[in-house]
Image (spheres, rainbow, N blue to C red):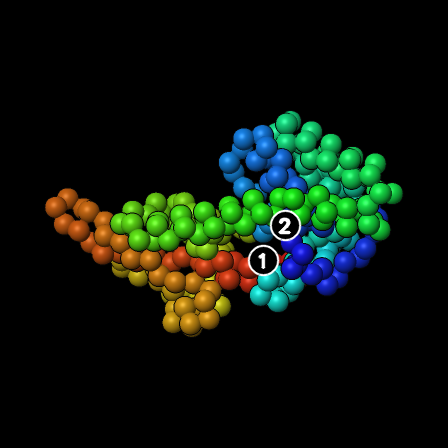
Amino acid sequence: MENLENINPKQGSNTISSLDLVSLINTIRKEEGIETVLRHDHFLVKIEKELGEDSQLFRSAYKNLQNREMPCYNLPKDEATLMLMSESRGVRKGVLLKLRELENAQPKLPNNFKEALKLLLQKEEESERQQCLIESQYVQIKEQAPKVIAFENVIDSANTYTLDSVSDILNIGRTTLCKMLEEKKWKTIKETHGTSSTRYAEEIGYAKTIYEYVKIGKNEIKTKRFVLKKKGLDKLLIERQSA
């Protein structure tokens, strides 16, 4: 996490970035035996839904490992606590205890609340790196295995999303999303055997076309499916937050 630079911090001793809060939530989830990992981009959408227009008061940005500017939020304690309400009782209690420990230890830790939190999360970095390695290996194995794609689900939770998944993340209708992607020249208009991405979208890494064979009776028909890549989803999220 030390490689993530907050470029618009709106600093305050009682604020925590959405990045740090997500890392802390995932740490406690792991301790509670919960395998589901909270994604930061999903958490941003959750913040906007929960805080509404007030979320813009805490809007910020950071530079990721590729030196790209990405959105985040710096949340005061009350708003951070509110965002924990949808977590399980065990996770919520664990995160709040960690936050309280950081506050109580504040005089003994560097400068402010944020630095204290980073010090705590450094202990989790090695396990996070190992988890990333495992996930990377899983994706490679999955890509090499025979493809059986469920159209209505996330095809690759790390990098590739179906239209329904993106619609849920952006909280807009599928029809509206399709029209938006067609206007952006990312997606073709629906064709006989499915919908595909455009050459423009594939060249800039926003989307791609997934092919599969669907068995109808004794015949197998080759179909194609438009899917959005993570780079394209990040682009839409930034545009939505800037609108």
Q: Quadrant of the C terminus?
A: bottom right
Q: Nearer the viewer, residue 33 or 42?
A: 33
Residue 183 horizontal/vertical position (percent): 48, 67
* Type of amino acid at the residue the image marks with label 2: Leu
Residue 29 horizontal/vertical position (percent): 59, 35
Q: Residue at x 54, y 50 (%)?
A: 129
Residue 107 position (above or below residue 159): above
Which residue is tagged 1?
237
Q: Residue at x 73, y 32 (%)?
A: 97
Q: Residue at x 38, y 71 (%)?
A: 199
- Disc 1 is placed on an element classified as helix
Residue 83 horizontal/vertical position (percent): 69, 39
Q: Nearer the viewer, residue 171 or 142?
A: 142
* Type of amino acid at the residue the image marks with label 1: Leu
Asked whether, in this view, residue 28 is left or right of residue 132, the answer is right
- Disc 2: CA contacts within 10 A as few (<14), some (14-19) or many (>=20): many
Asked whether, in this view, residue 38 is left or right of residue 118, the answer is left
Report the disc number at residue 44: 2
